[in-house]
Amino acid sequence: MNSVEFEINLFSWFEAVAVAEIYMGMAMASLVKPPSIHLTCLPNASTQLGLYPHSVRSEHVPSNSNSNATSPQDRGGRRQLLSMGATIAPWIFFSSTGTFAAETKKGFLLVKDNKDGYTFLYPFGWQEVVVQGQDKVFKDVIEPLESVSVNLLPTGKQDIRDFGPPQEVAETLIQKVLASPTQKTKLIEATEHNVDGKAYYTFEFIAKAPNYTRHALSIVCIANGKFYTLTTGANERRWEKMKDRLKTVVDSFQISNV
């Protein structure tokens, strides 16, 4: 592997997607109020796994619910209702990019992007937001560190293994792309698996900021001339509660030929 080329490619990616994936808790809380907002992150705002903050446009995708309540008590009630498995009509959406989402596994929705050739599951109740530099982002509007994002980068490589073994690739991505320079990071595990002839690297890591710690999972793969990255995670204090759901998200990520 040409390590210099790898570093340059990652730096270019870093510049291309240098936008906050995780907003401040106050900003995320505001997503439940208006259906469409413009959100500006201050330069010194704490961010996680989205690199540096920029002005971004976020949209709250409304559900089929007719409730207009936005108090913490009401939001907590809705979360409890969902966790109890109440019967709620699943919602479906289509976009111009050929994205389809529908409930296929209990507690999860399936996203299928026909244009870019990938699918994954995400927990029911998370909302889609539009973030510059990200192909897809779904977030929990109550817990701001719980999210999943998909990034795409053109590449001339044919296989993720062309960049090196799982641990080496994971360390470089964590240090250069998936955490800000001010955060302390730790790689917990990096593994490789193959699906339909495509090699995937999956890794688990922790990124510690002064006021929070995020426990995250990422999966990367090269196909269709693109470097695919899906990252999901949660606040460390909620990891034990969320880890099985987040592992379902990562394990569900698959790429098809387009």
Image: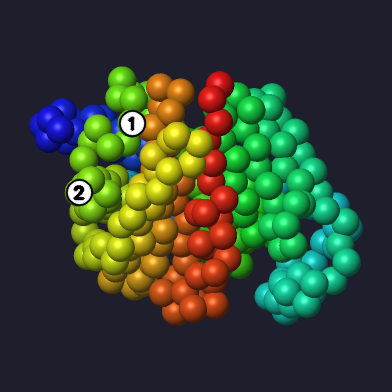
Camera-nearest residue between 114 and 60: 114
In the image, is residue 155 above or below residue 221? above
Compare marks 1 and 2 and give the one earlier in the sequence: 1
Residue at image location 88% in from the left, 56% down from the top: 89
Amino acid on which disc 2 is placed: Glu
**Total labels drawn:** 2
Q: Nearer the viewer, mark 1 or mark 2?
A: 1
Quarter occupied by residue 154? top left
| Residue found at x 53% / y 62% | 246
Residue 89 shown left or right of residue 121 in the figure: right
Q: Is residue 187 left or right of residue 150?
A: left
Query: Whole-percent x and y of residue 29?
Result: 59, 63
What residue is disc 2 on?
Answer: 168
Q: Secondary structure at mark 2?
A: helix
Above or below for 38 versus 217: above
- Tell me the distance, in whole angstroms, between the alpha carbons under discs 1 and 2: 15 Å
Q: Residue at x 43, y 35 (%)?
A: 198
> On screen, 155 above or below 148?
above
Please provide percent x and percent y for residue 151. Answer: 44, 38
| Secondary structure under the numbered disc 1 in the rendered image | loop
Quadrant location of the N terminus? top left
Picture residue at 49% right of the left edge, 78% below the top: 240
Residue 222 in view of the camera: yes
Tell whether 138 sits left or right of 91. left
- Location of residue 183 (image quadrant): bottom left
Q: Which residue is mark 1?
A: 159
* Residue 32 rendering spot, x and y as whole percentages: 68, 59
The residue type indicated by label 1 comes to: Asp
Mark drawn on residue 16: none
